[in-house]
Amino acid sequence: MAEHDTSQEKTEQPTPKKLREAKQKGQIPRSKELNSMSIMVIGAAGLLMLGHFMIGSLSQMMINGFSISRAEILDPSAVFNRFGSAAWEALSGIFPFLALMTIVAIFTPLILGGWAFSFDQIALKPERLNPISGLKRIFSAKGLMELVKALAKFFVVSVVAAAFMWSQAEEFLNLGREPFLQGMGHAAWLFGYSFLVMSLSLVLIAAIDVPFQIWDHSNKLKMTLQEVRDEMKETEGRPEVKSKVRSLQQEMAQRRMMEDVPTADVIITNPTHYAVALKYDPETMDVPVVVAMGKDLIALKIREIAKQHDIEIFEAPPLARTLFAHSKIGQEIPGQLYYAVAQVLAFVFQLHQAREHGLDIPQRPDPYVPNEEEFKA
């Protein structure tokens, strides 16, 4: 049976929770080829754009460095000043290029995987020092892919370089016939242009490596059906725990509801199956509000509390059932029942006045309750 247990095979895509945990551990898709390609291509383009400025700054540094008067040679402090000035000129000349390369190195990882800082990746782990584990990594599918990429890079760059050198052979041969300064400038331009062309050849390698790294990362994080089920239980809660929590919430809600029953003005009953407690204060309320309701045992408890606090119990089965079906605790009664409830409340208030002043008991109303079709309309 175990041989056919597909629930133990990692066939499911990683869940968002699994991906978040992997990123916290520093396990994100990474493509060294993408990083190398970005640095090489943008670096070559930077050399072509900033090369003239850099050569000018370095040339000025050399001119100033070799233009020293006799007085400066004999003055030790002047030598240090000259050295500081030369260092500043060299740094200012290459600083734009260094800043460009720093920005590329920092922001290129955002293209694939984003930034991830994890101490797990730099922590010392004994298994990383195990030579057998190292050999397994070397001869694994990923190790084979790295070898293929290295050979492919060598082949592609070599072919592109040979083709470019062949196409520009005349340009390179003419360098020896040009004046020194002109030839140096032309050689620098050819160097930067050659560097850019060979760097662009790495785009093909990166275009193959990026999808592979995404697939490999997702494949490593795949989950079994059992792992998915366990995660769902941990995320949503085990059924028995959820049932217990729901039971406690219901008990707390019922307890709060029973505490509000003494504030009600009337209890409308079925008479035994349903009980709905209504409250209405003309000074603070526009419409009566349901403070408690329930059926069977809860309805019995509501009636008991009402009797203990001398709250009027009004038997109106149709009205009680309709209120129970279409009302919610803590909310106003439905508009279709305004008239029926108003009749009941008017009777209750008149009954209290009659008992207080010894007047005749008012006639008990028979409130009209709309049927379901009228109620929905």
Image (cartoon, helix red, strand yellow):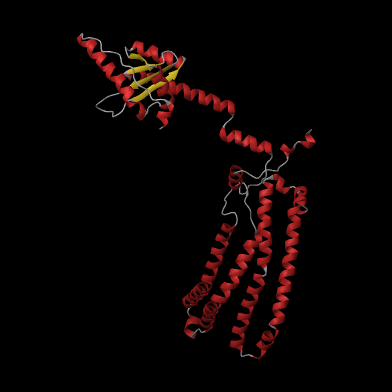
Q: Is residue 157 above or below residue 7?
A: below
Q: Is residue 281 left or right of residue 149?
A: left
Q: Is residue 170 left or right of residue 269?
A: right
Instruction: Tell me the residue at 56%/34% (across/down).
Output: 236
Q: Is residue 248 above or below residue 152?
A: above
Q: Is residue 201 above or below residue 65?
A: above
Q: Is residue 279 visible?
A: no
Residue 234 percent location from the top left of the image: 59, 34
Q: Is residue 284 above or below residue 55?
A: above
Question: Which quadrant: the C terminus?
Answer: top left
Q: Is residue 263 visible?
A: yes
Q: Please give the count of numbered marks on the rendered protein.
A: 0
Question: Which quadrant: the N terminus?
Answer: top right
Q: Nearer the viewer, residue 158 or 350?
A: 350
Instruction: Tell me the residue at 36%/18% (across/down).
Output: 261
Q: Quadrant of residue 172?
A: bottom right
Residue 204 percent location from the top left of the image: 68, 66
Instruction: Tell me the residue at 73%/54% (across/down).
Output: 142
Q: Nearer the viewer, residue 232 or 271?
A: 271
Residue 119 percent location from the top left of the image: 59, 47
Q: Quadrant of residue 125?
A: top right
